[in-house]
Amino acid sequence: MARRKISNTQAVFIILFWGFLCYLLITSSEKFTFDVIFAIVASGIIVFVPLYKNIRNRNKEE
């Protein structure tokens, strides 16, 4: 099954949405604990690794 390529606009919106969700997490938590830091780092890995791979593969194919 072929994967769809992510356009630059889609990547920007994904990053902005992730940043907004991180902002909500930070502002809604009472204390800045390890759990908050872990959630931000783990979600960042989940978001940015596939984006990086998609952009890297798109540049190789051109």
Image (spheres, grey):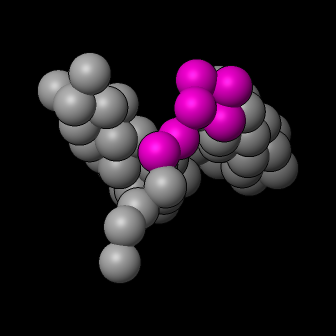
Q: Residue furthest bottom?
A: 1
Magenta span of residues: 5-10
Residue 17 in the image, given as x and y percentages of width and height = 74, 40
Tell me: 49 left or right of 24: left
Q: 45 or 8, which lies in front?
A: 8
Tell me the residue at 80%/44% (across/down). 24
Residue toward you, 13 or 6: 6
**Residue 55 lies in magenta, yes or no?**
no
- Residue 18's place in the image compared with 19, above or below, is below
Q: Quadrant of residue 26?
A: top right
In the visual, does 4 lie left or right of 17? Answer: left
Q: Quadrant of the C terminus?
A: top left
31 left or right, relative to 27: left
In the image, residue 20 sits, relative to residue 34, either above or below, namely above
Residue 61 at what x, y percent from top left? 22, 31
Q: Residue at x 41, y 62 (%)?
A: 3
**In magenta stretch: residue 8:** yes
Q: Nearer the viewer, residue 11 or 60?
A: 60
| Place of residue 6 in the rendered image (x, y in percent of width and height, measured from the top left) | 53, 41
Query: Residue pushed farthest front?
Result: 62
Report if residue 26 is visible in the image. Answer: no
Residue at 35% in and 78% down? 1
Give whichever of 6, 46 is nearer the camera: 6
**39 up-or-down from 5: above or below:** below
Q: Residue at horizontal 35%, vertical 49%?
A: 50
Q: Determine whether, in the image, residue 60 is placed left or right of residue 19.
A: left
Work out whether 57 lies above or below 41: above
Counting from the top left corner in percent of width and height, residue 51 is at: 40, 40
Residue 42 visible? The answer is: yes
